[in-house]
Image: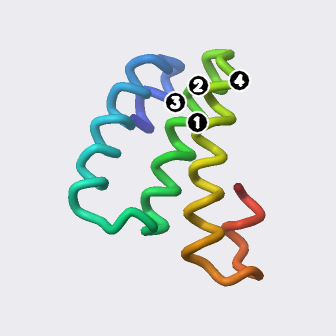
Amino acid sequence: GGVYNNMGDYSKALEFYEKSHKILEKALPSNHPNLAFSYNNIGGMYNNMGDYSKALEFHEKALKIREKALPSNHPDLASS
Protein backbone atom coordinates (compact mmCIF):
# COMPACT_ATOMS: atom_id res chain seq x y z
CA GLY A 1 0.00 0.00 0.00
CA GLY A 2 2.78 2.38 0.85
CA VAL A 3 4.39 2.09 -2.57
CA TYR A 4 1.10 2.76 -4.35
CA ASN A 5 0.59 5.73 -2.04
CA ASN A 6 4.02 7.10 -2.97
CA MET A 7 3.15 6.65 -6.65
CA GLY A 8 -0.08 8.61 -6.13
CA ASP A 9 -2.35 5.62 -6.87
CA TYR A 10 -4.49 6.09 -3.78
CA SER A 11 -7.29 3.70 -4.70
CA LYS A 12 -4.77 0.88 -5.21
CA ALA A 13 -3.02 1.82 -1.99
CA LEU A 14 -6.36 1.72 -0.18
CA GLU A 15 -7.04 -1.75 -1.58
CA PHE A 16 -3.78 -3.07 -0.14
CA TYR A 17 -4.12 -1.25 3.17
CA GLU A 18 -7.56 -2.84 3.55
CA LYS A 19 -6.16 -6.30 2.76
CA SER A 20 -3.45 -5.76 5.33
CA HIS A 21 -6.00 -4.60 7.88
CA LYS A 22 -8.10 -7.75 7.44
CA ILE A 23 -5.02 -9.85 8.18
CA LEU A 24 -4.23 -7.79 11.27
CA GLU A 25 -7.81 -8.11 12.53
CA LYS A 26 -7.48 -11.90 12.44
CA ALA A 27 -4.07 -11.95 14.07
CA LEU A 28 -4.31 -9.27 16.77
CA PRO A 29 -6.62 -8.35 19.64
CA SER A 30 -9.12 -5.61 18.80
CA ASN A 31 -7.30 -2.97 20.86
CA HIS A 32 -3.79 -3.61 19.51
CA PRO A 33 -1.89 -0.43 18.54
CA ASN A 34 -0.97 -1.91 15.14
CA LEU A 35 -4.66 -1.85 14.24
CA ALA A 36 -4.68 1.86 15.00
CA PHE A 37 -1.70 2.33 12.68
CA SER A 38 -3.60 0.43 10.00
CA TYR A 39 -6.72 2.56 10.47
CA ASN A 40 -4.55 5.66 10.09
CA ASN A 41 -3.18 4.31 6.80
CA ILE A 42 -6.70 3.75 5.50
CA GLY A 43 -7.81 7.16 6.73
CA GLY A 44 -4.85 8.75 5.03
CA MET A 45 -5.84 7.27 1.69
CA TYR A 46 -9.39 8.59 2.01
CA ASN A 47 -7.90 11.96 2.88
CA ASN A 48 -5.67 11.86 -0.20
CA MET A 49 -8.69 10.99 -2.34
CA GLY A 50 -10.67 13.93 -0.92
CA ASP A 51 -13.21 11.87 1.06
CA TYR A 52 -12.66 13.74 4.31
CA SER A 53 -15.63 12.36 6.24
CA LYS A 54 -14.48 8.80 5.54
CA ALA A 55 -10.91 9.76 6.46
CA LEU A 56 -12.10 11.21 9.75
CA GLU A 57 -14.06 8.03 10.50
CA PHE A 58 -10.90 5.91 10.25
CA HIS A 59 -8.67 8.35 12.10
CA GLU A 60 -11.22 8.41 14.93
CA LYS A 61 -11.16 4.58 15.07
CA ALA A 62 -7.39 4.76 15.38
CA LEU A 63 -7.59 7.31 18.16
CA LYS A 64 -10.09 5.22 20.16
CA ILE A 65 -7.78 2.20 20.05
CA ARG A 66 -4.78 4.27 21.05
CA GLU A 67 -6.65 5.89 23.92
CA LYS A 68 -7.47 2.43 25.29
CA ALA A 69 -4.16 0.73 24.58
CA LEU A 70 -1.58 3.42 25.35
CA PRO A 71 -0.71 5.57 28.34
CA SER A 72 -2.13 9.09 28.24
CA ASN A 73 1.30 10.64 27.60
CA HIS A 74 2.26 8.36 24.70
CA PRO A 75 3.41 10.29 21.58
CA ASP A 76 1.25 8.17 19.25
CA LEU A 77 -1.83 9.80 20.78
CA ALA A 78 -0.61 13.13 19.47
CA SER A 79 -0.26 11.74 15.93
CA SER A 80 -3.88 10.65 16.03
Q: Residue at x 29, y 55 (%)?
A: 24
| Residue 16 x %, y % | 33, 32
Specify which label sits upstream in the sequence, 3 or 1: 3
| Residue 77 x %, y % | 71, 66
Dot 4: few (<14), some (14–19), or many (≥20) neighbours within 10 Å? some
CA gap, disc 4 to disc 1? 9 Å
Quadrant of the image containing the C terminus: bottom right
Which numbered disc covers residue 57?
A: none
Specify which label sits upstream in the sequence, 4 or 3: 3
CA gap, disc 4 to disc 2? 7 Å
CA gap, disc 1 to disc 2? 5 Å
Residue that carries the numbered disc 4 in the rendered image: 52
Amino acid marked by disc 2? Tyr
Q: Secondary structure at mark 4?
A: helix
Amino acid marked by disc 1? Gly
Tell me, yes or no, whether the two marked residues, 1 and 2, touch with CB atoms within 8 Å: yes
Residue that carries the numbered disc 3 in the rendered image: 6
Residue that carries the numbered disc 1 in the rendered image: 43
Q: Secondary structure at mark 3?
A: helix
| Residue nearest the observer in this picture, 36 or 64 | 64
CA gap, disc 4 to disc 3? 19 Å
